[in-house]
């Protein structure tokens, strides 16, 4: 196949369908199932139907402690006219789980039986088969206990063992080699210098792949060396079911992945009409799928889900679970380029009786946005986005119950408030605090994007229930000697302003005394200000969670 210098730009579904069919043509087939002991198979997926080997119960068993009787011998019995049965020939004592002796067809609980010497008196009629667990009542021999595609849960494992099944055939877990690439990559925990990139994508990708019932083997990071990459990819294609290469997907001079695949096998496509994740590379080498994922972490995670997951489904021979969805009302307009399918991370909040979706930052480099997000909103390729107020469907990253429990705060950054939230979180309350400054926080509160916000300054706007939490000293933070008259910068998130001063980007930043201390910066106090908590009316109870102001 010739060298491609341009990116393909077909819709995702078409790109994927074409790739999967090319893989099938190249001989990629589902892997053979594996035979495992039931105890070793928890979490795995059943490959072939499993039938019960033995009934449960496999003998008629007493369900209660009492006397096995012939039901007909008790007919007509009452408190005043009990049936007198001879123990041994007309009634036999049984414990729960004992075999019902032949010829008997009911059990009378000891509470309803009165021993009288060698007799026992039964003061009520027993219905035939009462308190007897019949053979196969729970599981009949030969019954299908597990269907292909069922996940082996502790319940299923127990049922299999109850039916005397000790081994199961489960879907194979494809083995995936994950290669991080880039000369600038360094291991987490290293002492870093500018330009170094802490290598975390391979952990991110391996984690996702393992969640999808596959085995990920992270490989040492590869420097940007064409021949080395080529040799390692060829070797991995021979030894793994799937090869994932991360970064080196865009048009930069050291982005070799596509070339390597084209030279070793077939480059099926490079580029797809999605955002983020456009430069994804799909190929095949020696009959094995080889996928190049973009370097930016959000793009890498998303393309892993959109392309690696379906290939894993092909290899294991069966679908993996998708995400649950929920409907939510968008609080802000989302504008998206026509011709690209866009995946927007959203925060979800329970507000009054509904769920609202707040679009988050769209930078593909922000791994924190995936942590903060509760879900993903898909803007179709032929749409330019959604108006504020539209009801949209969101794919959930976490259980809805967890999302509905959380309290979400914005506004100015104030450490004592953060401490209080940390305390609440320690006690089990789900909370989040995403400071964006007093003004932005107030707007967010008005639009319903947060449950509460911190406002710094005099009397806050009267629109929301408010409580004075305390006072703080504001001023300029700077490094060694106080900079001259040039103005400093104000950052909406006080920690970020102080961080910019720390990094030598700004001469000084407007921040609070606590933040300056946190960053060990010099501090020139200018004014004292009040800090208020403002909340949505239905969250007014939150105001009482904080001790009175100063
Ligand atoms: N001139 C153009 N530049 C770029 C284009 C383009 O079309 N033309 N596409 C952009 C898009 S879209 C994306 S996405 C990125 C893809 O970049 P690469 O796949 O080539 O990846 P790198 O440049 O090597 O890395 C980018 C960035 O990703 C982070 N990264 C990479 N590897 C790791 C890792 N193992 N662990 C953690 N983080 C990693 C890192 O921040 C890199 O700087 O290209 C755009 N450019
Ligand atoms: O498509 Mo890139 O993946 O924008 O970030």
Image: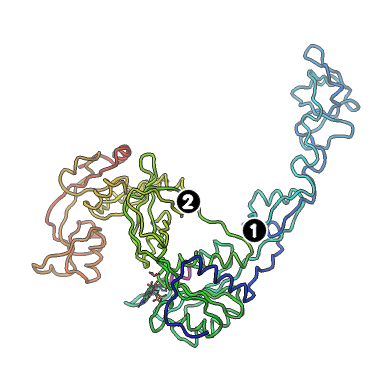
Q: Residue furthest right?
A: 89
Is residue 200 on the magenta stretch?
yes
Q: How crowded is mark 2: few (under 14 residues within 10 Å), some or many (20 or more)?
A: some
Q: Quadrant of residue 94?
A: top right
Is residue 210 on the magenta stretch?
no
Q: Could you say whether the residue bearing mark 1 is in a helix, strand or loop?
A: loop
Q: Mark 2 points at which residue?
A: 325
What's drawn in magenta, residue-wise?
Answer: 197-203
Q: From the image, which quarter does the C terminus lie in?
A: top left
Q: Quadrant of residue 503?
A: bottom left
Q: Residues within 10 Å of mark 1 (few under 14, many from 20)?
A: many
Cα distance in 3D space between marks 2 and 1:
23 Å
Q: Which residue lies furthest to the bottom in this view?
A: 227
Identify which residue, 268 or 458, lies in the foreground: 268
For residue 25, above or below residue 349? below
Where in the figure is residue 165, as x and y percent of width and height? 75, 54
Q: Mark 1 points at which residue?
A: 45
For residue 357, above or below residue 236? above
Identify which residue, 68 or 463, lies in the foreground: 463
Colour convention of the picture: rainbow
Q: Which of marks 2 and 1 is nearer the N terminus?
A: 1
Where in the figure is residue 395, as x and y percent of width and height? 46, 54
Quadrant assignment for ligand 2: bottom left
Q: Is mark 2 within 8 Å of ligand 2?
A: no
| Image disc number at residue 404 | none
Mark 2 against mark 1, which lies toward the viewer? 2
Q: Is residue 514 left or right of residue 1?
A: left
Where in the figure is residue 350, as x and y percent of width and height? 38, 44
């Amino acid at each position: 196949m010739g060298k491609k210098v341009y990116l393909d730009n077909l819709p995702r579904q078409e790109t994927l369908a074409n790739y999967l069919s090319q893989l099938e043509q190249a001989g990629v087939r589902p892997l053979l199932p594996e035979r495992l002991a039931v105890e070793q198979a928890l979490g795995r997926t059943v490959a072939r139907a499993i039938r019960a080997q033995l009934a449960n119960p496999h003998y008629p068993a007493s369900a209660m402690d009492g006397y096995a009787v012939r039901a007909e011998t008790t007919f007509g019995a009452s408190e005043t006219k009990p049936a007198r049965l001879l123990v041994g020939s007309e009634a036999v004592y049984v414990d729960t789980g004992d075999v019902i002796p032949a010829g008997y067809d009911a059990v009378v609980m000891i509470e309803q039986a009165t021993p009288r010497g060698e007799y026992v008196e039964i003061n009520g009629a027993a219905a035939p088969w009462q308190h007897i667990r019949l053979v196969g009542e729970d599981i009949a021999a030969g019954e299908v206990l597990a269907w292909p595609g069922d996940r082996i849960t502790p319940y299923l494992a127990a049922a299999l063992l109850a039916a005397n099944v000790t081994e199961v055939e489960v879907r194979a877990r494809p083995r995936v080699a994950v290669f991080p690439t880039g000369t600038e990559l360094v291991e987490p925990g290293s002492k870093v210098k500018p330009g170094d990139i802490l290598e975390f994508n391979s952990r991110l990708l391996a984690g996702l792949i393992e969640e999808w019932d596959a085995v990920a083997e992270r490989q040492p990071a590869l420097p940007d060396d064409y021949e080395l990459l080529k040799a390692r990819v060829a070797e991995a294609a021979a030894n793994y079911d799937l090869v994932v290469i991360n970064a080196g997907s865009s048009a930069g001079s050291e982005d070799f992945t596509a070339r390597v695949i084209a030279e070793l096998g077939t480059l099926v496509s490079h580029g797809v009409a999605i955002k983020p994740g456009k430069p994804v590379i799909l190929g095949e080498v020696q009959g094995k799928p080889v996928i190049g994922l973009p370097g930016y972490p959000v793009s890498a995670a998303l393309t892993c889900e959109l392309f690696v997951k379906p290939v894993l489904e092909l290899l294991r021979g069966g679908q993996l679970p998708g995400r649950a969805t929920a409907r939510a009302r968008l609080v802000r307009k989302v504008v998206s380029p026509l011709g690209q399918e866009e995946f927007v991370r959203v925060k979800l909040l329970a507000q009054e009786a509904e769920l609202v979706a707040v679009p988050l930052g769209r930078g593909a480099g922000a791994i924190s946005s995936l942590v903060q997000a509760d879900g993903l909103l898909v803007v179709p390729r032929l749409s330019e986005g959604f108006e504020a107020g539209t009801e949209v469907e969101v794919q959930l990253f976490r259980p809805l119950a967890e999302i509905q429990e959380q309290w979400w705060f914005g506004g100015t950054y104030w450490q004592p408030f953060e401490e209080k939230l940390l305390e609440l979180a320690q006690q089990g309350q789900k909370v989040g605090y995403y400071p964006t400054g007093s003004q932005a926080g107030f707007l967010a509160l008005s639009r319903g994007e947060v449950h509460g916000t911190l406002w710094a300054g005099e009397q806050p706007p009267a629109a929301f229930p408010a409580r004075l939490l305390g006072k703080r000293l504001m001023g300029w933070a700077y490094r060694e000697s106080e900079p001259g008259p040039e103005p400093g910068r104000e950052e909406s998130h006080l920690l970020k302003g102080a961080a910019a001063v720390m990094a030598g980007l700004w001469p000084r930043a407007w921040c609070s005394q606590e933040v300056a201390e946190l960053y060990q910066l010099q501090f020139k106090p200018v004014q004292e200000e009040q800090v208020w908590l403002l909340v949505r009316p239905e969250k007014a109870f939150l105001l009482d969670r904080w001790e009175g102001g100063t």
